[in-house]
Image (cartoon, rainbow, N blue to C red):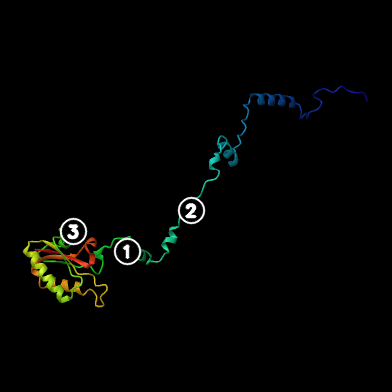
Amino acid sequence: MSARKLSSDTFANRPFKNLKNLLVEKEKKRCTEPPVAKKEEVPGDEELFARAMKEVKEIKEFREIPVYHNVSTYSRCRRSPDHDALKALEELVQGKRPVHLPDTPEFVEWIHEDYRDDLAQRLHEGHFSVQDCLDLHGNTVQEAKEEVSYFIKMSITKGYRCIKIIHGRGLRSPQGPVLKNSVVQWLLTTFRKYIAAFVTARQCDGGAGALYILFK
């Protein structure tokens, strides 16, 4: 059988006929499309911290900083409720804290009803000058009564406005402050009509062991 020359149309099924054209078109398209930007990577925390601390320099003086421990307020709150009272009493005994006489049971105060309520306070605070003084130490009750009677009458006669009587506190007496109680009783009864007010003296003038007396 003789060989016969085959034409291009001999094979009806030619799947790669347009392959070359497709490759050429794809290459053209690739060249015309804009390049795809690469996605930027987000740095991690450690890298961000390293960047932030890049310019930081160490201060050698701060390598060792002393630490001061404050006293806990909780420990102070746990102390005994009587602590402050005992501390104050100790300071009073040692003379480190002044005694506020109006807060003590030994404080005495009386005001005539015709006068203002603050008169005794003003008298105690020293707003009236003491013009004469009587000391009853060493006297019996009867002797003290006679001394007080004479002293008050003479003070009124001389026109005195304010006097002082020292009666003591009776701390060494088994019966307590007998003279003090007796003087207060006489002032409220026998000599009441002459008196505007009387009150315990200031600490510098005898304190609970003396009385200021203000005449009308």
Circle 2 packing at 10 Å, graded few (<14), some (14-19), many (20+), is: few
* Disc nearer the start of the sequence (1/2): 2
Q: CA distance from mark 2 to mark 3?
A: 49 Å
Note whether residue 51 is visible: yes
Residue located 24% across and 72% down the image: 170
* Disc nearer the start of the sequence (2/3): 2
Circle 1 packing at 10 Å, graded few (<14), some (14-19), many (20+), is: few
Q: Which mark is residue 198?
A: none
Percent position of residue 156, x then y = 7, 64
* Disc nearer the start of the sequence (1/3): 1
* 41 is higher (above) or lower (below) than 107: above
Quarter of the image where one finds residue 208: bottom left
* 87 is higher (above) or lower (below) than 14: below
Q: Secondary structure at mark 1?
A: helix
* 136 is higher (above) or lower (below) than 57: below
Identify the residue under disc 2: 69
Residue located 22% across and 69% down the image: 168
Percent position of residue 142, x then y = 15, 76
Identify the residue under disc 3: 126
Q: Nearer the viewer, residue 21 or 169?
A: 169
Q: Quadrant of the N terminus?
A: top right
Identify the residue under disc 1: 92
Q: Please, what is the three-letter code of the amino acid marked with disc 2? A: His
Q: CA distance from mark 1 to mark 2?
A: 33 Å
Q: Nearer the viewer, residue 169 or 1?
A: 169
Q: Secondary structure at mark 3?
A: loop
Q: Please, what is the three-letter code of the amino acid marked with disc 1? A: Leu
